[in-house]
Image (tube, coloured by chain):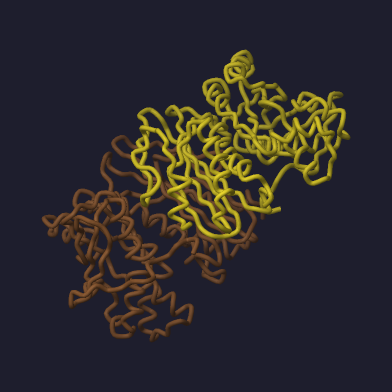
Chain colours: A yellow, B brown
Amino acid sequence: MTEFDFIRRYLMRQQSDKDVLLGIGDDAAIVRPRTGFDLCFSSDMLLAGRHFFADVAPADLAHKVLAVNISDMAAMGAQPRWALLSAALPKLDEAWLQAFCDGLFGLAGQFGITLIGGDTTKGDYVFNITIAGELPQGQALRRDAAEAGDDIWVSGRIGLAAAALNHHWQTLVLPEAVHTLCEPARLRPMPRVALGQALLTVAHAAQDISDGLAQDIGHILKASGVGAEIFADRLPTLPILRTLLPQARLYDYLLAGGDDYELVFTAPEQQRDAVLAAGRAADTPVTRIGRVFAGEGLRILEANGKEMQLTHLGFDHFG
Amino acid sequence: MTEFDFIRRYLMRQQSDKDVLLGIGDDAAIVRPRTGFDLCFSSDMLLAGRHFFADVAPADLAHKVLAVNISDMAAMGAQPRWALLSAALPKLDEAWLQAFCDGLFGLAGQFGITLIGGDTTKGDYVFNITIAGELPQGQALRRDAAEAGDDIWVSGRIGLAAAALNHHWQTLVLPEAVHTLCEPARLRPMPRVALGQALLTVAHAAQDISDGLAQDIGHILKASGVGAEIFADRLPTLPILRTLLPQARLYDYLLAGGDDYELVFTAPEQQRDAVLAAGRAADTPVTRIGRVFAGEGLRILEANGKEMQLTHLGFDHFG
């Protein structure tokens, strides 16, 4: 099988998107942007050994590679539309490719995303996806839009991906029933696209939680020139993790674990009902976890009001 | 230096593009497409050891990574506008990064391209660029638009990159003066953006020459359902290569060498003057090298009309 056979057989699936004028197979794809929308762009690259293990199931891998990109669209409040996949593969193994493409097109289909292009080459596994999405003109959930007095919210539950990853590394042993609940967060995160869109006219700033809650909130605070306090006991997680894990470890997972691909966002206090309604509309739990204040820095407060000391705040990609 | 310092210090340069509403630094960039234009998207990934040598000068490397993507825009007749760069780097070496970014932003500036996003991670050198460009609505130089009776044209000169590459590999020894003329084609190819745009209303099909002329013409023929004949003695190259190289080798470089990033395109016979005028307007030589016919297959004809036998037709990325 040559590169061209591979592209024809696996990547040029029939996809129906009337705004795609020319899909895979030319020097470039052509799309027609809809009037009244801005376009959002994001790229994420995943390398074997760094972002995933070479023995990962190919369908899970494809899901993850696309999900992290979709999550960036969710964090802007955008509707993901088109994706380009660049892949370095050590060989063209048909069973592997079939499973990978099933995972990829499965998730793409759920979100109405069309694969319009990319590149393939021989090499150790590397995947890069660039995603483009639409935003109603002038609307966006930007990092620099948090304001003093805003509440801080987080979607879904966090710390599950970190627990599953540590179980995988054998630095933690989860009971089987708990592992079963955590593993999907690590292998098949579901980006919060519907919530992001529902929050467009409700929230101020948003960001997805990829590097760890503390670091990711930090990006919002820095870009917005504000500070924040987080109430540690309000952080939503799987309740059993609070009893299973020593407190230091629990908060390490919750605040620095990352990889949950939930959204953290800020919204004015008078929008509390609207935020809850957006969560219901998107069928996504939302939890109020803190407050933005004028000033700087991030304070994590324990239930007794004492400030928690953090030493390790998330993932530096060159650390 | 952390990843975030690197992005801030080297990648978040002041760039002026009023259609970029939000650049590097958020979950995604936001651009506002102009009314009346379609958007073109393309991605290319380059790996150390496969597409470049680890000892390449970083400014040349950056030029090449961006140039191959710009060339895809040129081949559609599009105006490149925005780029996203994903980079895996083994370490954050400031001198290397400075030189790389000088090469990158140097070429981007020449074409009015804004770097709006990307990703950075630690790993053996991998670069992926996704580029987006604008096309007047409904116009494009597509691969599937060649028609029987069309002339086939090529821009500039070909075979120079292959000669320089073989010299680099020491499978060919070029005299110093000849090497000096060929080396820029290998290290600093200049995509034919102005020509592609000038051809939009003149040419039918176009493609850039990355994998080798024969294979790249083959893509046009297959997509268009036609055949073609090429007149070998008309292929434009550096004249001294015709005397320096044995004929088999010469035609291997000309037909299968690739990496020249010239354009091969087809246009109706009655557009010959318009093609020459487009070449002059774009300050780019254009040479008529063959003809499209109803049928299939690619015939390379020698000056005596005899058909040349080809065994090796270009670069398969998994070969």
> Going 32% across and 63% down the picture, which residue do you hit?
B262
> Going 46% across and 34% down the picture, which residue do you hit?
A81
Residue A29 placement: quadrant: top left
Residue B93 position within the rendered picture, expressed as x and y whole percent measured from the top left = 62, 63
> Going 70% across and 22% down the picture, which residue do you hit?
A287
Residue B47 position within the rendered picture, expressed as x and y whole percent measured from the top left = 54, 61
User: In the rendered view of the protein, which quadrant contains the N terminus of chain B?
Assistant: bottom right
Residue A32 position within the rendered picture, expressed as x and y whole percent measured from the top left = 35, 36
Q: Residue furthest top?
A: A273
In front of the other: A204 or B145 = B145
Residue A169 horizontal side relative to residue B119, left or right: right
Residue A293 placement: quadrant: top right
Residue A110 horizontal side relative to residue B289, left or right: right
From where the camera sits, is residue B79 visible? yes
User: Can you say whether B60 is above or below A47 in the image?
Assistant: below
Residue B120 horizontal side relative to residue A162, left or right: left
User: Can you say whether A62 is above or below A107 in the image?
Assistant: below
User: Can you say whether B307 is above or below B75 in the image?
Assistant: below
Residue A259 position within the rendered picture, expressed as x and y whole percent measured from the top left = 68, 39
From where the camera sits, is residue B8 visible? no
In front of the other: A139 or A65 = A65
Residue B247 horizontal side relative to residue A136, left or right: left
Label total for image: 0
User: Can you say whether A129 is above or below B54 in the image?
Assistant: above
Residue B249 placement: quadrant: bottom left
> Going 39% across and 55% down the picture, which residue do you hit?
B70
In front of the other: A51 or A107 = A107
